[in-house]
C-alpha cells in the first residue's frame, strides 16, 4: 500500500489512497489472490435450520499484503447469508487463507435440481454447484424437530437459534451447537420449533446445559413444555427446580405445527441455555 | 434550492474548478454521475482534525447503506466539494474534485488547505445531480493566536440498540468549536434486539470480523439523523476504544484468538474506521497498524494529545475484569500506551506552551476502587491495571511542572470528575492534574442519577468529586483563566425526544488543578 496525495483545485489537496505497485501503476485488484470454496459442491434441502454451508477462502499468494473483495451470488430461488466478503489478506509464508462461512437457504417449493452459487473476485470466478434434494422422510422413531424452523424470544450474539434443532446435544459442543438467549437476567425466555405441515407428537425431550457430575448447573430450572393447539399454547409438562440435563415430556398423542419451551428461571440466574429440543411421534 | 445555487456557483467558476482537466483526476472523473439515480449522501457529511489552515471533509457515497459497497458499482467516481464562508454558499473560498473508490468504500477524505485560522466555514459535496447536506466546521487558531474562548464537547460509547442519540441532537444544537469523540463509535458484537426498529435484523446478529461486516456496521450507525447532525455541527477529533475492533483487545491480544488471525480482523476494523472517520492520510492504516495518536493545537489556549490506549498496550493482567491491584498491575515493565507513545506524550507536554494541555483518550486515569469497605478492587482494563504507566504520567507532570493538564476519557458509561493526585492513597498528596470522564451517549440504557456502583465509587475514592450514571455528554468552555465542564444528561434514552439537562457544571481554575462547582 502506498499513499498518494493528488493535487486538486486551488490550494486544496484531495486525498486519494490506492493500491499500487512499486512503480506506481495501479495493481489489478486481487492479482495475487486465489479464490476457493470448501466444499467445492454441496447438497441442501428445504429444512430451514439445516442450511447448506460452505467456506469462501481468499489466499494472498503474493509478497505484498492486500485487501480483496469477493461477491457471492446464488441462482434463484436460493438465498445466501452473505453476498460479499471483503478482507485484509496478509502476505504470509506459508500462505494464509482468510475464510468466511456462507449459508445457503432453500426456500419452500424449490424444485430439486442443481443451482449455481457463483463467487467473483476481480476477474476470478468460482462456481459452487448446490444440489437441492427433497427433504427425506424421517425414519421411524426419528427426531422430527431436526432442522425445522426454530425461533426464540431472543438469541445471544455468539449463538444461533438453530443450535437447538441441529441434532447435536453433546454438552462439549455447547459453544457451537447450543442456543443461549440474549437477555441476561431477564425472564421469561422461550424457544419454539415450527413445522410447515402439522405433525403428530407424543414426546418432547428438552436438553439443557450442564456438565458431567454437574447436570443442569448452567441450565434451565423452571420451565413449561408446550404444544400449539388451536392457536393457543397448551402446556404438556411443567418443571420447577429442574436438576437434570435431559427432561422427557410424554403426553397423549397430539397433532400440532409448533412446540415451545417457556423458561421462567435458570439455575445460573443469568441466561436460558438449551442444547437441543427434540420432538417424537407417539410410539 | 440548494442544488440550484450550487449549480449557479459552479457554473460561474467552471473554468476554475470543474472543467474536468484538473491534475490528479483519474479516468473515473469522466463519469460525472454517482453511478446511481438514488440519493448517495445517506450517511451525511463530516469534518475533522482542524488545523489553522484546513480541515478534513468526509462523506461516503452509499445509496443503499447496508448493501455491498453501499449500493455502488465496484468502480471509482469523482465527487465535487466546496467550502464557503457562509451557510448559503454565496462566498465560496475553495472547491475541488476528489475521487472515491470501491477499495475505500467510496469514502471521501478531502484535506482542504488554504483556509484562514479560527474561522467558521460551511461545506458540501455534489455527486451528479445530488447535493449533500451542508456541514459547519471551524479551523483551529494560528499557533501563536490568543483566543478568549473555546467551546468543545466530548462524547463516547454509542451502542445504537440501547438508546436514541438524543444527546447528539443536543450536542449538535450547541454548535461547538470542536467535538472530541473518545471511542466505542460502534460495537462489534451481534445483537438480536434493541430499542430501534432495525435492531436485530439478520446482519446485526453476528459480530463484525470482515471488512464488509465493519463497513456495514458503520453504515448502520451513521444512518442515524442525530449522529449526522452532530457531525454536521462541528469538526470532530476522534480516537477509538476497544469496540471499534473487539471487546477489550490489547495490542496483538484478543481473548484466545491467535495473534495472526486477530491481526487480520484488526486490519479490517482499522480500515473501516479510517474510511468512516474524518481522518487524514497519516492516519491511514498500513494493514493492522494505524498511527492514531497525534497532537492538535488551538493557538495558545489548548493543545490536544489524542492518545491510543489500545494498539500498544500490554495485555490485561489477572484475567481482566475487576480485581485487587497487585504486583502485576503495578509492573514497571508494562505500559498502557507503549513506551514510544509515553515518550511522545511526555515530550509533547514538556514542550507545550499552551494554557491547557488536554489528554483526549479512552479510559479513566483516576483510581477506581469499586470495593465497598476495606481492600480494593479496580478494573484491569483502565489505567488502574497499568498503574506504573499512570505513575510515570503523573510524576512527569509534577516533576516537569506541566500546568493545567486535563484528562478527558469515556468507557465507563458514567460521568466522573476527579482530582488526579500523585498518590491516590495519601489524602495529603499533591493534585497535579484533573480528569473529566464523560458518560455514554447511549450504551447501558437509561441509567439513573446515582446507582449503587456509583455510590461505592464516591465513597471509596475521595479524589472523585462527582459521579452520575445517566447517559449524555460533556459540553466544555475553555478560557485562559477557567475550564468549565457542563455535564449534559438525558432523562431517558430508550424513548426518543427525552429532555436533556445540565446535571452539574464543574470548573477548574488555571494553575489550580482541583475540581469545584462552577
Image: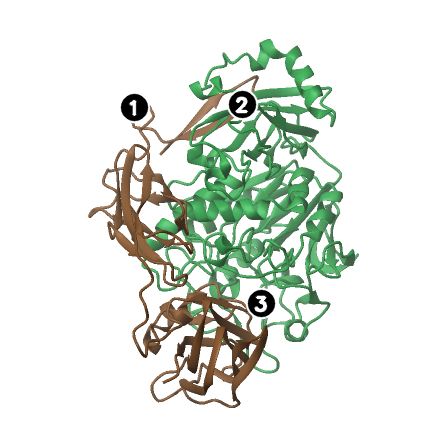
Badge 2, how many Cα within 10 Å: few under 14, some, many 20+? Answer: some
Colour chain B appears in: green
Colour chain A appears in: brown
Q: In this view, does B188 lie to the left or right of B170?
A: left
Outermost residue on the top side: it is: B15
Would you place residue B488 above or below residue B107 in this image? below
> Of discs 1 and 3, which sits in the foreground?
1
Secondary structure beneath dot 1 equals loop
The residue labelled by disc 1 is A23
Marks 3 and 2: CB-CB under 8 Å?
no
Q: Can residue B291 be seen in this view?
A: no
Q: Position of residue B19 (x, y in %)?
A: 55, 12
Query: What residue sits 35% from the left and 89% below the top?
Result: A213
Label 1 and label 3: CA atoms lie apart by 53 Å
Would you place residue B287 above or below residue A179 in this image? above
The residue labelled by disc 2 is B33
Q: What chain does badge 3 belong to?
A: B
Q: Position of residue B117 (x, y in %)?
A: 66, 28
The residue labelled by disc 3 is B367
Amino acid at each position: 500500500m502506498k499513499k498518494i496525495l493528488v493535487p486538486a483545485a486551488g490550494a486544496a489537496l484531495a486525498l486519494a489512497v490506492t493500491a499500487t505497485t512499486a512503480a506506481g501503476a495501479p495493481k489489478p485488484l486481487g492479482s495475487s489472490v486465489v479464490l476457493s470454496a470448501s466444499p467445492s459442491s454441496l447438497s441442501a434441502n428445504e429444512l430451514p435450520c439445516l442450511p447448506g454451508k460452505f467456506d469462501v477462502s481468499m489466499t494472498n499468494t503474493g509478497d505484498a499484503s492486500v485487501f480483496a473483495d469477493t461477491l457471492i451470488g446464488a441462482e434463484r430461488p436460493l438465498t445466501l447469508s452473505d453476498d460479499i466478503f471483503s478482507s485484509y489478506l496478509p502476505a504470509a509464508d506459508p500462505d494464509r487463507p482468510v475464510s468466511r462461512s456462507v449459508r445457503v437457504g432453500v426456500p419452500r417449493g424449490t424444485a430439486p435440481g442443481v443451482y449455481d452459487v457463483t463467487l467473483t473476485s476481480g476477474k476470478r470466478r468460482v462456481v459452487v454447484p448446490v444440489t437441492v434434494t427433497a427433504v427425506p422422510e424421517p425414519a421411524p422413531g426419528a427426531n422430527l424437530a431436526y432442522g425445522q424452523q426454530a425461533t426464540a424470544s431472543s438469541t445471544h450474539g455468539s449463538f444461533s437459534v438453530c443450535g437447538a434443532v441441529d441434532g447435536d446435544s453433546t454438552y462439549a459442543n455447547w459453544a457451537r451447537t447450543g442456543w443461549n438467549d440474549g437477555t441476561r437476567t431477564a425472564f421469561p425466555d422461550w424457544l419454539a420449533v415450527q413445522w410447515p405441515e402439522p405433525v403428530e407428537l407424543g414426546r418432547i425431550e428438552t436438553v439443557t446445559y450442564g456438565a458431567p457430575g454437574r447436570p443442569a448447573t448452567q441450565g434451565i430450572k423452571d420451565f413449561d413444555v408446550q404444544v400449539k393447539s388451536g392457536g393457543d399454547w397448551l402446556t404438556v409438562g411443567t418443571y420447577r427446580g429442574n436438576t437434570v440435563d435431559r427432561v422427557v415430556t410424554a403426553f397423549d398423542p397430539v397433532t400440532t405445527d409448533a412446540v415451545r419451551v417457556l423458561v421462567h428461571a435458570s439455575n445460573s440466574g443469568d441466561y436460558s441455555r438449551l442444547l437441543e429440543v427434540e420432538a417424537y411421534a407417539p410410539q | 434550492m440548494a442544488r440550484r445555487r450550487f449549480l449557479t456557483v459552479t457554473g460561474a467558476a467552471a473554468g476554475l474548478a470543474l472543467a474536468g482537466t484538473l491534475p490528479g483526476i483519474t479516468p473515473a472523473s469522466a463519469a460525472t454521475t454517482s453511478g446511481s439515480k438514488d440519493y448517495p449522501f445517506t450517511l451525511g457529511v463530516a469534518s475533522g482534525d482542524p488545523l489553522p489552515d484546513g480541515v478534513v471533509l468526509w462523506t461516503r457515497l452509499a445509496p443503499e447503506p447496508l448493501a455491498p459497497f453501499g449500493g455502488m458499482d465496484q468502480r471509482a467516481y469523482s465527487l465535487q466539494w466546496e467550502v464557503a464562508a457562509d451557510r448559503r454558499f454565496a462566498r465560496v473560498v475553495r472547491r475541488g474534485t476528489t475521487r472515491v473508490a470501491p477499495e475505500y468504500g467510496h469514502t471521501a477524505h478531502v484535506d482542504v488547505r488554504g483556509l484562514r485560522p479560527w474561522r467558521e466555514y460551511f461545506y458540501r459535496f455534489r455527486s451528479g445531480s445530488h447535493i449533500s447536506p451542508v456541514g459547519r466546521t471551524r479551523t483551529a487558531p494560528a499557533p501563536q493566536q490568543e483566543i478568549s474562548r473555546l467551546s468543545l464537547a466530548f462524547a463516547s460509547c454509542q451502542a445504537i440498540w440501547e438508546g436514541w442519540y438524543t444527546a447528539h441532537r443536543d450536542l449538535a444544537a450547541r454548535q461547538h468549536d470542536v467535538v472530541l469523540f473518545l471511542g466505542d463509535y460502534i460495537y462489534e458484537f451481534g445483537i438480536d434486539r434493541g430499542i430501534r426498529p432495525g435492531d436485530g435484523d439478520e446482519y446485526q446478529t453476528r459480530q463484525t470480523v470482515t471488512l464488509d461486516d465493519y463497513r456495514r456496521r458503520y453504515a448502520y450507525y451513521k444512518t442515524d439523523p442525530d449522529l449526522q447532525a452532530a457531525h454536521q455541527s462541528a469538526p470532530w477529533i476522534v480516537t477509538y476504544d476497544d469496540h471499534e475492533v473487539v471487546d477489550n483487545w490489547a495490542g496483538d491480544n484478543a481473548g484466545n484468538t491467535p495473534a495472526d488471525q486477530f491481526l487480520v480482523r484488526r486490519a479490517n476494523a482499522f480500515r473501516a474506521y479510517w474510511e468512516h472517520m474524518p481522518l487524514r492520510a497519516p492516519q491511514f492504516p498500513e494493514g493492522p497498524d494505524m498511527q492514531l495518536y497525534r497532537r492538535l493545537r488551538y493557538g495558545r489556549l489548548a493543545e490536544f494529545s489524542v492518545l491510543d490506549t489500545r494498539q500498544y498496550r500490554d495485555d490485561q493482567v489477572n484475567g481482566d475484569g475487576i480485581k485487587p491491584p497487585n504486583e502485576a498491575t503495578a509492573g514497571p515493565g508494562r505500559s498502557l500506551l507503549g513506551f514510544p507513545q509515553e515518550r511522545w506524550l511526555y515530550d509533547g507536554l514538556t514542550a507545550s506552551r499552551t494554557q491547557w494541555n488536554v489528554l483526549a483518550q479512552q479510559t479513566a486515569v483516576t483510581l477506581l476502587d469499586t470495593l465497598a469497605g476495606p481492600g480494593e478492587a479496580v478494573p484491569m482494563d483502565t489505567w488502574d491495571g497499568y498503574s506504573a504507566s499512570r505513575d510515570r504520567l503523573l510524576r512527569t507532570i509534577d516533576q516537569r511542572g506541566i500546568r493545567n493538564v486535563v484528562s478527558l476519557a469515556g468507557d465507563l458509561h458514567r460521568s466522573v470528575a476527579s482530582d488526579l493526585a500523585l498518590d491516590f492513597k495519601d489524602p495529603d498528596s499533591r493534585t497535579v492534574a484533573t480528569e473529566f470522564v464523560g458518560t455514554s451517549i447511549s450504551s447501558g440504557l437509561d441509567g439513573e442519577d446515582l446507582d449503587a456502583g456509583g455510590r461505592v465509587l464516591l465513597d471509596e475514592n475521595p479524589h472523585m468529586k462527582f459521579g452520575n450514571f445517566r447517559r449524555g455528554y460533556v459540553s466544555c468552555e475553555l478560557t485562559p483563566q477557567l475550564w468549565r465542564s457542563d455535564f449534559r444528561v438525558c432523562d431517558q434514552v430508550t424513548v426518543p425526544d427525552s429532555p436533556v439537562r445540565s446535571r452539574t457544571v464543574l470548573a477548574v481554575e488555571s494553575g489550580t488543578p482541583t475540581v469545584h462547582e462552577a
